[in-house]
Image: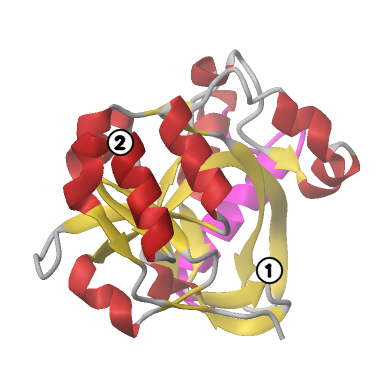
Amino acid sequence: MQGKRISMLLHFTQNFSILESILETSFLQLGYCTEYFGHKDKVISSSAHPMVCFSEYEDFELEAKEITYGGYAIGLSKCWAVEKGLSPVQYVEKNSQAAIGLSKLLEARQKNGKDTIPKRLRLPIMQIKCFTKHETGHNSYFNEDNFCFKSENEWRYVPTKNQIGGGYISLNKNTFLKKKDFYNNKLKPYPLKFEANDVIALYVQTEKQKSLLSKKYPHLTNVIDLAKWKVAAKV
């Protein structure tokens, strides 16, 4: 893998045991992620959506990157991503016409009574919103304003309601935060699965970890490498 220009979707994690668990189970666990959206300085929607997040990079790009979410990663092929219904995030500038347009649709969706959108369009609006993010905004992980989200090259898996047993693809943020474990536990029966041949990269921190994975998964030896990026630290 070293030196090759292979575009892949990387799921980052903070410790080796989580990476081991992902390999042992051959799946990635869904979790609700809180998001806000609006235009200019007006927040229209504060919600939580079920998802698994990835970043699209080529191997040679990683050395120059500062990664937010950990020093370990599993890389999966874009063919697998397309088959599973993943999509890149659409980044919009908060002062743009795109932000204003989606904000107006979200406002209409929130209203009851006459002169609102047809019921059949309520879900499509949320499907678009689940894959739309401000280009720059507040990063709750670092508690940092003006964070450049576009630099993360994010792709997402967001399930349909049927794929999570009729569960919620959108929850009010405050409703979710009051019962985080309750709602996340409801997603556990519906993980995002992959096969061994979908794995095209594994990144670890030490030679010892690299050796351990090679012995346990000899068929993956050629795709295991030491992480090249810097892990961003919380201030």
Q: Does residue 88 show up?
A: no
Q: Amino acid at mark 1?
A: Tyr
Sequence-earlier tag: 1 or 2? 1
To which quarter of the image does residue 56 belong? bottom left
Q: Is residue 179 above or below residue 87?
A: above
Which secondary structure, mark 2?
Answer: loop
| Residue 113 is inside the magenta segment | yes
To which quarter of the image does residue 208 belong? bottom left
What residue sits right under mark 2 in the picture? 217
Q: CA distance from mark 1 to mark 2?
A: 33 Å
To which quarter of the image does residue 117 belong? top right
Closer to viewer: mark 1 or mark 2: 2
Q: Is residue 215 above or below residue 69?
A: above
- Residue 41: image x %, image y %? 69, 78
What residue sits right under mark 1 in the picture? 141
Q: Nearer the viewer, residue 81 or 125?
A: 81
User: Going 55% across and 64% down the picture, which residue do you hit?
Assistant: 69
Q: Which residues are magenta?
A: 93-118
Q: How many marks?
A: 2
* The C terminus: image quadrant: bottom right
Q: Is residue 39 above or below residue 170?
A: below
Q: Which numbered marker is on residue 120? A: none
* The N terminus: image quadrant: bottom left
Q: Nearer the viewer, residue 31 or 65?
A: 65
- Residue 209: image x %, image y %? 42, 55
- Residue 201: image x %, image y %? 26, 52
Q: Is residue 176 left or right of residue 64?
A: right
- Residue 14: image x %, image y %? 57, 59
Q: Is residue 50 left or right of residue 215?
A: right
User: Going 85% across and 48% down the picture, which residue do you hit?
Assistant: 174
